[in-house]
Amino acid sequence: MSAFEDLMSYARDTTALGEIAGRLGWDQETVMPRGAAAQRGAEMAAIESVLHARRSAPEVGDWLEKAEAPDEVGAAQLREIRRAFDRANKVPARLAKELAQVTSEAQGKWAAARADEDVSAFLPVLERVVELKREEGAALAAGGTLYDAMLDDYEPGITGAEIATLFDAMRPRLVDLRAAVLDKPAPKGLTGMYDEKVQMRLARKLARTFGYDMNRGRVDKAVHPFSSGSGMDVRITTRTNPSDPFNCIYSTIHEVGHAAYEQSIDDAYALTPIGHGASMGVHESQSRIYENQLGRSRAFTGWLFEEMRDVYGNIGINSADEFFGAVNRVHNGYIRTESDEVQYNLHIMLRFDLERALMSGDLQVADLEAAWNDRFKADFGYAVDRPSNGCLQDVHWSVGLFGYFPTYSLGNVYAGCLHHALREAVPLLDDQLSAGDTLGATSWLRENVQRHGGLYEPRKVIEKATGAPVSEAPLLDYLEAKFGALYGL
């Protein structure tokens, strides 16, 4: 065997072990007994130790020196193996293991603190997570910017300064649109109660409608919806609220976007370093375009309106146009995942600024709740009423995902670019969506984005798919057109 073949064989085993670790994470958030958290932390730490040792092993370095890529795919495989090798050799094994254990335990403490509305119960373990992530960031940055090193885990090739510039360009138009919309009467919303078992049945139907292969996946419930896995085993979770069926519907469609991406990657890349999405920003482009540009479109909501009436009977909405307004209603609210399209990116900007400050040391963990509440009041005009609607609402910081939040808005920007290209490529898209047929859209996305997995760097994926540079303009134009028409601006 050649050095390249030896390296790929080794990398496949490492990737398979990583998938096992991911399955433990899925179990922890869905069916694991609450009392098992400490043991699960030890289990995750043990697996992380094995993974870290494999990724940083001297023989990987030897193979990388000798390996010659046979083609473009091989070159991408080497790029990703080298990236993981360099990262693993910068982070001490002791730190990687401790991070895995502490974040596993912190996730359980976050969930309990959120349920009890008790920030003080969570802050001590969060402070330890932040300390460890700062240490990791310093090791990875090697004298550079800690936050940029963290971003590289989720969106290779971009810096915090570039994201800040992008957000500065987006904010004025978003703020102006939000003010104009909220100055108008809001469309009628849903009222009443909606059986949660029926919500889950509809969720599974919608998952299939958007192309999710249930033979290689499953839909479960979790506190915070997520997608997990790759290739032949890609699972999603959603959540239900008896007074808000849209929460379940759009959480499901969102996670199906992630899962469809993973299920659609070329089978030849399975259990290899490029057998996953190109970045979290590109991943979010899929979940957000499924959820918003497709799932919340006037055409698709017309079909969904009839589906809702079939399973619930009278829902207090009298027409497809009214239902479209209810789905896209811009409203005050605290929760990022329940936010409308107009305000969603403002939630991300808040988190981006706070986590950068945490990592730089400009903000201390003890002051996080006050800083969050002050910033929310300044940005949204009303006060946070309880911690679960404020700094305890997201799971990300408890599990150490610093640098992850801005990829949600990057995903929105990428989705705006893709949607513009999709509309040109599939001129009968609305006719198809109005019949509940997503195949034209999902096939185009599968062919132009999803099948490539990690073959290309993030921006190149979007630019190859659209034939144009990445820009925030298509997203902002789409939002202004859609909500301008809906609200008569």
Image (cartoon, grey):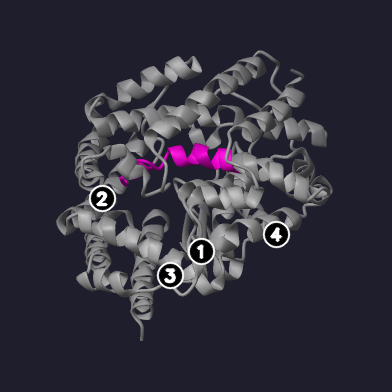
Which is more foreground, mark 2 or mark 4?
Answer: 4
Q: Which mark is residue 105?
A: 2
What's the residue type where badge 2 is placed? Glu
Task: Determine whether label 3 and label 2 are within 8 Å by CB.
Answer: no
Instruction: Please give the residue where the numbered disc 4 appears in the rendered image.
Output: 443
Q: CA distance from mark 3 to mark 2?
A: 29 Å
Residue at the extreme bottom: 1
What percent of the width, then of the height, locates residue 230? 48, 65
Residue 59 sits above or below residue 228 on the image: below
Residue 316 shows in the view: no
Q: Quadrant of residue 212?
A: bottom right
Q: Could you tell me which secondary element the residue under label 1 belongs to?
A: strand
Q: Which mark is residue 272?
A: 3
Q: Could you tell me which secondary element the residue under label 4 belongs to?
A: helix
Q: Quadrant of residue 209?
A: bottom right
What percent of the width, then of the height, locates residue 105? 25, 50
Q: CA distance from mark 2 to mark 4?
A: 40 Å
Range of residues picked out in magenta? 395-414
Residue 211 sits above or below residue 105 on the image: below
Which is more foreground, mark 1 or mark 3?
Answer: 3
